[in-house]
Structure formats: structure tokens, C-alpha cells
Image (cartoon, helix red, strand yellow):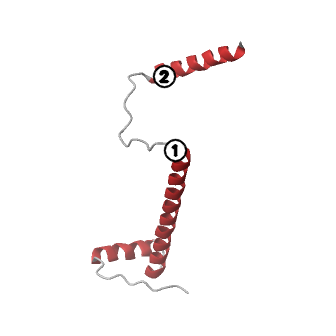
Amino acid sequence: MGVTVQVRDLDPAVNDRLKGAAAAKGLSYSEYLRRELTRIAEKLRIDERWNEVSSSARSRADVPSIDPEPWQPLGMTTDEIVASVRQDRDDRADRDDR
């Protein structure tokens, strides 16, 4: 059996928007809110699981966390980077052939 949830002091404009969204989907207000709350709860469950997996993988791998600062440009064009990667692959293939 489900539980009853009561929300107090909801802004009337928010209430109107939610009722409008429910009507646009052809749902009762109660059914619309039930679906939205279920969707939010599922997203929270996924987010929590992702955090568990991420922290577990980081601790097992002993990998430092990524610096939140944006990556700094290398001062190379895309073509130069591709050429460098190809050259490195060719060099390794030559070494492996010996």
C-alpha cells in the first residue's frame, strides 16, 4: 500500500504549472506527481550507485582524482597531434618487427 504525501506552502504558480503539465499529458494531478516523484527517486538511486562505484574504483586503483581545472592547450594543432600518434605507432611497429 502506498503512502500519502502532503506538501505545504507550495507556491501557487508552481502548483498551476504542475497541474498544467499533468493536463498536457492527459494525467490526473495525483498520477502526474506520483510519476514525477518516482522518476526523481530512481534518478537518486542511480546517482547514489554511481557514487559508490566511482569511489570504489578510485580506491581500488589508487588513482588520484582528476583536477577540476580545465585541460590546458598543448600548443599543437589537431593535425600535429594525429601525425605524432601515427609516428609513434609506426615506431612501435618497427620495433616489434625486429
Inspect the image, locate mark 2, and give the three-letter code of the amino acid beneath it: Ile
Inspect the image, locate mark 1, and give the three-letter code of the amino acid beneath it: Asp
In the current view of this chain or complex, which residue is farthest to the right?
97
Residue at point 46% right, 73% down?
37
Q: Is residue 57 left or right of residue 36?
A: right
Q: Is residue 61 left or right of residue 64?
A: right
Disc 1 + disc 2, Cβ < 8 Å: no
Tag on residue 62?
1
Dividing the image into 4 quarters, which one contains the C terminus? Answer: top right
- Where residue 38 appears, as percent x and y from the top left, is 50, 72
Label 1 to label 2: alpha-carbon separation = 29 Å
Residue at point 44% right, 72% down?
24
- Specify the quadrant of the image occupied by residue 29: bottom left
In the structure shown, which secondary structural element does the residue marked by tag 1 occupy? Answer: loop
In the structure shown, which secondary structural element does the residue marked by tag 2 occupy? Answer: helix
In the rendered image, the vertical position of residue 2 relative to residue 86, given as above or below: below
- Comparing marks 1 and 2, which lies closer to the viewer? 1
Tag on residue 81?
2
Dividing the image into 4 quarters, which one contains the N terminus? Answer: bottom right
